Amino acid sequence: MNLLSLYAHRSRLEIRLLLRNRNAVVFSMLLPVFLLFIFGSVFNKTKLGHTNVSFDQYFVAGLLASGLLYSSFQQLAIAIPEERSNGTLKRLVGSPMPPSVYFVGKLAASTFTYIFQAIALLVIGHFSYGIHLPHSTSLWLDFVWISVLGLTASSLLGIAFSNFAKNGQSASALASPIVLFFQFTSGVFFVYANLPKWMQDIAAVFPLKWMAQAMRGVFLPKYFASQEVAHSFELPKAALILGLWTVGAALVCRFTFHWLPKNET
């Protein structure tokens, strides 16, 4: 088999394994949809301040950004330590398969999860909660590059973070609270500009704040930019910061990722 065939084969395998894992399906694929049902029902038709923007519209943009973390960072940060502890990685590294095939398969599973989430959120949000979809090709293109760059950065961070846990159970205990913390501080559950300054300063260092803000630039009207802290959605700055996180995470993965448990290296 040539390399592209190996990539395709491993990608299909990882997606099948994902769908067989009930915990992954519930907590990675369906959680954002559950959150939309809950918050959308509670805050339905609630307007933000003196604007005509509903909380549901704001919340969907944040959920799409959170979906990038659920489907990539959280999913990989938990799955890889589990596979390292149960010997899966040991068997793979001892096989003739190029290492890149494993990571391409993981990225394919993360992409599959995110696409499912995005379609579900947009369809349910539009027809059940009146969410307005982007009305121009340029906005959809912005949505694509934000998704691709956010997914890449989050996946690499998940791979890098996987080195800190011994197994999937301890990884879940580490990764899930981190995701939850950044959701509360990055403008997902609450309007970012209304958060305390110290929360804004912490969140501004990390990717979720910029993914959520960039998504708001796609799904919220242009005039809402005046409600942002910088009075702009800052898409170029978001791209720069996500790009820096991508490069940094890639370097960490390159020099720190280990296939075997630490007691065997």
Image (tube, rainbow, N blue to C red):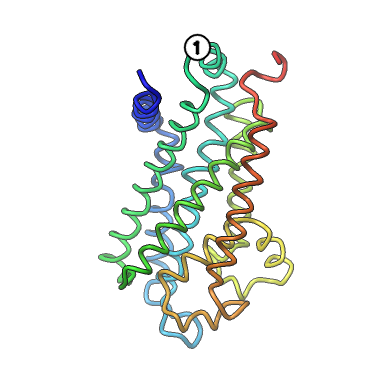
At x 71% / y 61%, what residue is drawn?
202
Quadrant for the N terminus in the image: top left
Q: Position of residue 81 (x, y in %)?
A: 59, 27
Q: Residue at x 64, y 33 (%)?
A: 254
Residue at mark 1: 95
**Depth order, front residue of 89/57:** 89
Residue nearer the viewer, 247 or 146: 247
Expressed as whole percent of the image width and height from the top left, the position of residue 249 reads 63, 43
Image x and y of residue 209, in percent: 59, 62
Q: Nearer the viewer, residue 159 or 97?
A: 97
Query: How many labels were placed on the picture?
Result: 1
Query: Mark 1: which amino acid?
Result: Ser
Q: Quadrant of the C terminus?
A: top right
Secondary structure beneath dot 1 equals loop
Q: Residues within 10 Å of mark 1 (few under 14, many from 20)?
A: few
Residue at the image point whose x is 62% and y is 77% from the top: 229
